[in-house]
Image: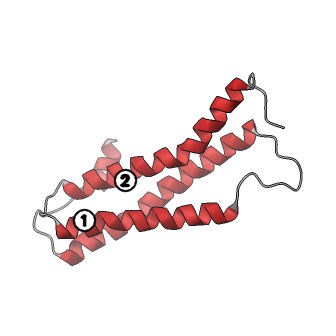
Amino acid sequence: MNYLDRLLEVDSEKRSTFQILLWWELRRILYNIIVLAFGILCLVIISALVNVPAGEDLIEPFAIIGFGILCNLCYSLGWLTEIFRKKDKRYGPKMFKIGLYFTLSFVFLPLAIHIIFWMLRGFKTMY
């Protein structure tokens, strides 16, 4: 976590609205990379637990696109709330981490459900 803390450092206590917005938008790239990497990892593990017949999809592409858009809309709440609250050096990094962990919990939720069903099936793949 020390590496993430260094990436999320805030230089000064007194920042303008533009500096707050820039801080968040530069870290949006990191946020999207982390969410995408964990999402792909979850899909790979789920595809190993579920044997999908030929011609069938394991995932709905529109749901993934919608989830990505929703994640980024919610990410924008970070800089929006920081602009309208008392300026604090710790607020941005703290909210970034809380938002990232919250998002990753939703990314891991389908995997957790599939693992539970996989164990209930006696460690056999579905289908």
Cα–Cα span, label 1 and label 2: 12 Å
Residue at disc 1, secondary structure: helix
Residue at horizontal 22%, vertical 73%?
19
Residue at horizontal 47%, vertical 61%?
71
Using the image, determine if residue 37 lies above or below residue 84.
above
Please tell me how crowded label 1 is: few (under 14), some (14-19), or many (20+) other residues with Cα within 10 Å.
few
Using the image, determine if residue 34 lies above or below residue 115.
below
Where is residue 121 shown, x and y percent of the image? 75, 26
Disc 2 marks a residue whose amino acid type is Gly
Residue under pointer 2: 99
* Residue most extreme to the bottom: 18
Please tell me how crowded label 2 is: few (under 14), some (14-19), or many (20+) other residues with Cα within 10 Å.
some
Quarter containing the C terminus = top right
Disc 1 marks a residue whose amino acid type is Thr
Residue at disc 2, secondary structure: helix
Badge 1 vs badge 2, beta-carbon distance below 8 Å: no
Residue at horizontal 68%, vertical 41%?
46
Residue under pointer 1: 81
Query: Disc number at residue 64?
Result: none
In this rendering, would 103 be left or right of 2?
A: right
